Image: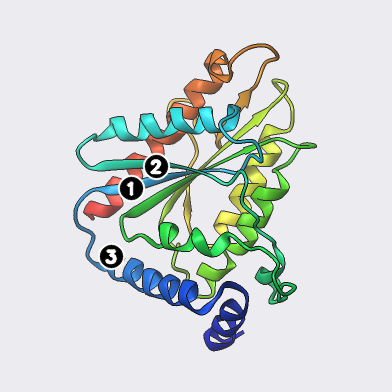
Amino acid sequence: MSNDLSRRRFLGVAGTAAAAGAVAGTAAAEEQKASPSGPIKILGICTSPRKGMSTAKALQVALDAAREVDPDNVEIELVELAGLRIPGEPAAGVELEPGERDDFPSLVPKLSDPKVAGLIIGTPVYFSNMTALCKAFLDRLMFFRKNDFALADKVAGVIAVGGSRIGGQLLAVESVQGALYGQDMIVVGAGPPTTRCGAAVWNQKDKDVTADEAGMQAVRDVGRRVAELALRLAKA
């Protein structure tokens, strides 16, 4: 499908002003790839439909660990999708019904920020996989794929939070990673010494998610690894 066609469909769904800003943002991101300067930013994308809950807390731990790698050169931001309406149909070129709400265009400028060098995606585990909100968000990243793979070479890590120690976290992590590979992103795990593929967190009943010491270590490792590689690439 041509870029012109994808742009027309995006305009029909998201509105002219939002799309124009998105295209300008992705162009700026492409320019930044060639000549990065200044601090980088790591975004934590929380795809839980419940704001401020366990997944958001785990992501904040990962983001704090990312910033600790180099506080002068790593900025962080937690983005919660809770409360947003992100329909998946536009990713397939299907226009929404007149007046149907679509909040994804509001996220495009943030994701297109030239400073953004890495993403950490966090999802609760629902029936051994990611949330519907997470899947819709990942599908809508098709916009960036159709705009010259604007997310390519950015670093990505994944965190999954489940209600039991072995509650489908691994499958959820791998499913999210598969979508990120489709953007030609550089997907990392937790790094040495454990080299986990991502962070599997146990949200124990009646305990704060941070009580899972093994899970929090994996979360910190993912955040650290994303920042380390993003900084190395920015300086290359």
Indicate the quadrant containing the N terminus: top left, top right, bottom left or bottom right.
bottom right
Residue 20, x across and y down, in percent: 44, 77
Tag 1 residue: 41
Residue at 28% x, 41% y is 74
Residue reaching furthest to the right: 127
Please tell me which residue lies in front, 10 or 202.
10
Q: Which amino acid does label 3 sit on?
A: Gln
Among numbered discs 2 and 3, the one appearing first in the sequence: 3
Figure disc tally? 3
Q: Are marks 2 and 1 in contact (CB under 8 Å)?
A: yes
Residue at 28% x, 46% y is 231
Q: Judge from the rendering whether residue 197 lies leftward or rightward of residue 113; answer left or right.
A: right
Tag 3 residue: 32
The Cα atoms of the two marked residues, 2 and 3, are separated by 19 Å
The Cα atoms of the two marked residues, 2 and 1, are separated by 8 Å
Disc 2: CA contacts within 10 A as few (<14), some (14-19) or many (>=20)? some
Tag 2 residue: 77
Among numbered discs 1 and 3, the one appearing first in the sequence: 3
Residue 114, x across and y down, in percent: 32, 61
